[in-house]
């Protein structure tokens, strides 16, 4: 936790909302992202799931999230939230020291194109102060298990 903000990030193959409102994360990449195949390659989709938790008494005015990769041939994700304006009416009458607020943010790249091995980075900035900086390795390699389906193989140059 940094300056009262805690952040957890994970990359996964899918994020599903169940009928009862629960969220299911499918195919979490626990040690970075592994793409089965040879570079350049693509996946049908890749999700970033991010939890940002803070004390209700210290609600930030802004939370900026930047996710990008040196190995991607895809646009970075760059979004700014304004949680204070959203939360003030909900918790105005509560004892703010007793509550925490968790934002659950997801982003989907579909499809996602990888030029080569590299890394994905996720930075979270609250009120202009970096509170999280994560780096996740990306490896493109043939899987030792032949039953794992390969990534989409791309020709060396992709048409614009």
Image: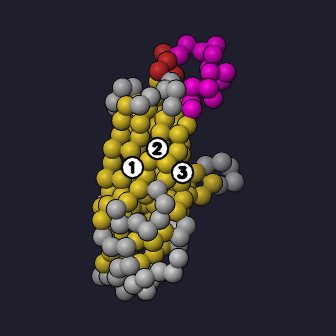
Helix, strand or loop at disc 3? strand
Query: Going from the N terminus, do you reach mark 2 or mark 1 first?
Result: 2
Q: Are marks 2 and 1 in contact (CB under 8 Å)?
A: yes
Q: Are marks 3 and 1 in contact (CB under 8 Å)?
A: no
Residue shown at 49% from the left, 35% from the top: 63
Residue shown at 69% from the left, 54% from the top: 19
Q: What range is drawn magenta here?
A: 82-96
Q: Label 2 crowding class (10 Å Cα cut-off): few <14, some 14-19, many 20+?
A: some
> Mark 3 or mark 1: which is in front?
1
What percent of the width, then of the height, locates residue 133? 33, 44
Residue 94 on the magenta span: yes
Whole-Å distance between the Cαs marked 2 and 1? 7 Å
Q: Which residue is mark 3?
A: 106
- Compare residues 21 and 123 and report the one nearer the observer: 123
Q: Is residue 135 left or right of residue 52?
A: left
In the rendered image, the residue lying farthest to the right is 19
Query: Going from the N terminus, do you reach mark 2 or mark 3 first?
Result: 2
> Mark 2 or mark 3: which is in front?
2
Q: Which residue is mark 1?
A: 122
What percent of the width, then of the height, locates residue 144? 30, 82
What percent of the width, then of the height, locates residue 13? 49, 65
Q: Label 3 crowding class (10 Å Cα cut-off): few <14, some 14-19, many 20+?
A: some
- Where does the N terminus fall, quadrant-wise? top left
Q: Which residue is mark 2?
A: 65
């Amino acid at each position: 936790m940094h300056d009262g903000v805690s952040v957890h990030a994970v990359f996964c193959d899918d994020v599903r909302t169940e009928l009862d409102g629960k969220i299911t994360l499918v195919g979490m990449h626990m040690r970075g992202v592994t793409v089965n195949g040879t570079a350049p390659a693509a996946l049908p989709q890749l999700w970033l799931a991010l939890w940002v938790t803070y004390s209700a008494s210290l609600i930030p005015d802004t939370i900026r999230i930047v996710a990008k990769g040196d190995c991607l041939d895809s646009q970075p994700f760059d979004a700014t939230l304004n949680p204070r304006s959203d939360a003030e009416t909900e918790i105005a009458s509560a004892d703010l020291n007793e509550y925490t607020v968790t934002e659950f943010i997801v982003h989907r790249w579909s499809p996602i194109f990888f030029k080569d091995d590299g890394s994905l980075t996720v930075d979270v900035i609250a009120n202009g102060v970096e509170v999280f900086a994560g780096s996740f390795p990306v490896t493109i390699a043939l899987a030792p298990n032949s039953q794992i389906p390969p990534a989409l193989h791309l020709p060396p140059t992709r048409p614009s």
